[in-house]
Image: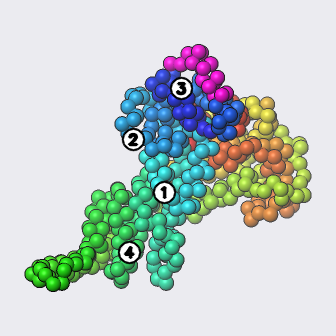
Amino acid sequence: MNIIKIATLLSLETSKIGLLTEADFAEMKSKLEAEKANHPNLTDESIALFFQALSNNAMLFQAVMNNRALFNFFTQKNLSKKQFQVVVDFQDEVQIKGFIQMYLMADINPFVYHKIAANDFEEIALLAEGRQFLPDRVIEKMRFYAIEKLELADKTLKPPFGDFSKILYIKDANFFTFLNGLKNEEIEEKVKSLLTTLMNLFMADKSSELAKRTFTAMKNYHAVDENFSISIERLKERAEINYKPFAVNKKKYYWIYAVVGLLVLTRVSFFINDLSKMNSELDSYQNYEDYEVQSEPRKLDRYYTDMRFKIDSFRVFLADYNQNQIRRLTRLSNIKTGQNPFQTFYQNQPTAESSNYLKFRNTSKYDMVLLENAVLYDSIKIPRTAHFIKAGESIEVNFNNAAAKTIFNVYMGKKLATFQTESNHLFIRSGSIVEYRFSELIPNVKEVLETDYTFKNDADINFVNGHLRVDSRGLIVN
């Protein structure tokens, strides 16, 4: 049970968070002990995490409780906006992201990805309302899957056509509401491309229910481009031109037939006129006259644009292997704190002395590899080097943050070794040796490894109660 659900189980009032006394804490502990018998997922670990969050991060806890999108998601409720009237002045997005990353990530990733795979967008569309408080890595992954869905639909609707049953989500208004929470230039271009494909389909088959319903659903997408929004609205209106059969007693009211016939003929004439206009709009849209880009986009070397996929592959290698398949294991026992254990990726040696250094202390019972990355072109992560830190030891990391922003990722476990598994994600060192990785991993290792950290001061890094704990002033968590 997550900490927000525990708060609702206790009927904890949002306005009282931060004002609780020792007596209040004692009363809550007593209630939760009694509730454990009724709620199997209310564990000692989740209770400890709740009190830790409530004691150390009261303002952040209150901010999440008072955000309708976040509260409804974490409690699986659907409360209205009028039920969130408590005024919360604290709105630091970065710190709220860090709070969610530390205490609530276990609820986000599995649920969101399962819903996307099942083409069920209602609940995650509501979650997208609170997108400014979600960790950047979550938003990035959601965008990746959203683009995949748009590309699949676009491809399926083009000759020779694919299986329409696999893209019925485009008829769902929630899908386009979901896109609203993620939209950027790339998503908008994918939606435009889908609209063009849908228009081609509709012009070829005016009876296409899929096209008509998608036009209607797409109206829920609020485009950045105002002209694009107008086009969506017009196409939705014209696709809905139809009439319903009208039945009367054949023996009476013959004058009604004449009126209905006249109305039908008038409606058909309007329909033909609208189709003519739609053809004209389609030609204009397909020629991109309204959406022409005046300047060429910046072109990057493929080395940079492909780096995200290479880093993802390396993460799979490090943290997503099947531990039951480990074979030919050889431990690396002579590595020292401060050394770089890798040769094939993050292969650069740690930077020599500079005027910019930070001290990192590994206060956990696990060994750690601190991955150092440069960020180029605002969003492209380039691996620099890696720093091994034994459990209980510390290092000083030197880096120059002037040329490019520096971010870090944390990889933790025990028994660094080389071994083989049945995986396509393999990195081979010289001598045909598989790259080193931990043969015993921390819980939630993938989520921990995917989290980006920007440090401005020294940091203590620990792993407690299944969560990474990073204590550092000025820390930014993405």
Report the mark closest to the observer, 1 or 3. 1
The reply to whether callout 1 and callout 3 are in contact (CB within 8 Å) is no
Residue 111, visible in the rendered structure: yes
Q: Which mark is residue 209?
A: 4
How busy is the neighbourhood of tag 4: few (under 14 within 10 Å), some, or many (20 plus)?
Answer: some
Badge 3 density bin: few <14, some 14–19, many ≥20, Cα 10 Å:
some
Label 4 vs label 3, nearer the camera: 4
Residue closer to the observer: 162 or 470: 162
Report the residue marked by disc 3.
Answer: 58
Report the Cα–Cα distance between label 4 and label 3: 51 Å
- Which numbered disc flags the more N-terminal residue, 2 or 1? 2
- Separation (CA) of disc 4 from disc 1: 21 Å
Residue 339, above or below 307? above
Q: Coloured how?
A: rainbow
Q: CA distance from mark 1 to mark 3?
A: 31 Å
Q: CA distance from mark 2 to mark 3?
A: 24 Å
Q: Which mark is residue 411?
A: none
